[in-house]
Image (cartoon, rainbow, N blue to C red):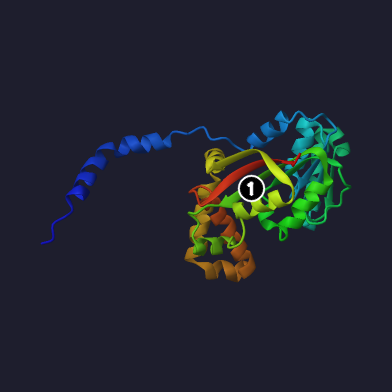
């Protein structure tokens, strides 16, 4: 009879004695910071009301509207997806019912990061949230950002980046085989003439905060399990493309919780 490793016996004798206490410690929040952190960074810049801000890849416009509400900025939201601009304008119309002045502060328009529809040196602050991984030509995008920024302007980037824990097959499922690469993004930033004034690697912190507030990651985990267990059911109903997008989105929420993706914040300025 093969003898069991004594150290393994010792481990499983010790661990059950502290397991409940360990679980209890893990149930305690680490007071993770949430997306409000971005507004704190913007506030610390001390920009005056009516400063010109660009929300690059504005999506459905919530962040653009919030920048105008909180700081009184003149905000241009740019996005290449027509649906996003439509939804953003509807959100702005709803917001102006509670704050009529917003209609004079926020404007949405179609445009791509590589060819921004803005004048040279016209923007004091560029905010770019979770969009750079979707940009095909980062070099052109950063060159455009530099072109439209004022000499003392800043660019705030909030982006999930892959870590060494993200294996190739997992990256493929996420659609991130060649995307979410911090090293490539940082090299492109430097080549465009930017330098980091402030940098934070937040790891899973934002994801933990969102999970504690909304339970979103747990919901996405359930969805991913169902998608993987019975793909034919959902492909038949919604199509392969929609299935792939949904699975990637679910995995994105999960991977950011377990260190395969890491939230990074960069505050950039141009070289002196």
Query: Disc 1 on helix, strand or loop?
Result: strand
* Identity of the residue drawn at 80% across and 33% down: 98
Neighbour tally class for label 1: few under 14, some 14-19, many 20 plus, Cα within 10 Å? many
Above or below: residue 214 compared with residue 112:
above
Name the spot of residue 161 as percent of width and height, x first: 59, 51
Q: From this viewpoint, is residue 50 visible?
A: yes
Q: In the rendered image, which quarter contains the C terminus?
A: top right
Q: In the rendered image, which quarter contains the N terminus?
A: bottom left
Q: From this viewpoint, is residue 239 visible?
A: no
* Identity of the residue drawn at 26% across and 42% down: 15
Direction left: furthest residue: 1
Above or below: residue 241 compared with residue 75:
below
Residue under pointer 1: 159
* Identity of the residue drawn at 51% across and 63% down: 168
Position of residue 257 in the picture relative to residue 12 (left or right): right
Name the spot of residue 102 as percent of width and height, x first: 84, 36
Name the spot of residue 116 as percent of width and height, x first: 83, 52
Position of residue 41 in the picture relative to residue 232 (left or right): right
């Amino acid at each position: 009879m093969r003898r069991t490793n004594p150290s393994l016996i010792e481990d499983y004798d010790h661990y059950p004695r502290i397991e409940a206490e360990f679980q209890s410690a893990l149930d305690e929040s680490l007071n993770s910071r949430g997306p409000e952190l971005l507004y704190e960074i913007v506030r610390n810049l001390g920009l005056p009301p009516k400063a010109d801000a660009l929300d690059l890849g504005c999506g459905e416009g919530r962040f653009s509207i919030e920048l105008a509400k909180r700081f009184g900025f003149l905000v241009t939201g740019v996005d290449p997806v027509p649906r996003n601009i439509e939804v953003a304008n509807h959100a702005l119309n709803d917001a102006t019912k509670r704050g009529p002045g917003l209609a004079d502060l926020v404007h949405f328009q179609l445009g791509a990061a590589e060819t921004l529809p803005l004048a040279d040196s016209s923007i004091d602050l560029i905010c770019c949230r979770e969009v750079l991984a979707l940009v095909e030509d980062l070099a052109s995008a950063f060159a455009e950002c530099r072109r439209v920024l004022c000499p003392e302007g800043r660019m705030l980037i909030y982006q999930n980046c892959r870590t060494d824990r993200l294996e190739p097959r997992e990256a493929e499922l996420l659609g991130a085989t060649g995307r979410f690469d911090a090293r490539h993004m940082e090299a492109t930033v430097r080549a465009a003439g930017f330098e980091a004034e402030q940098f934070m690697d937040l790891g899973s912190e934002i994801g933990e905060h969102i999970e504690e507030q909304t339970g979103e990651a747990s919901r996405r985990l359930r969805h991913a399990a169902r998608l993987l267990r019975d793909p034919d059911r959902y492909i038949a109903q919604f199509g392969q493309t929609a299935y792939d997008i949904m699975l990637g989105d679910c995995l994105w929420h999960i991977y950011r919780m377990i260190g395969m993706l890491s939230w990074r914040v960069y505050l950039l300025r141009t070289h002196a």
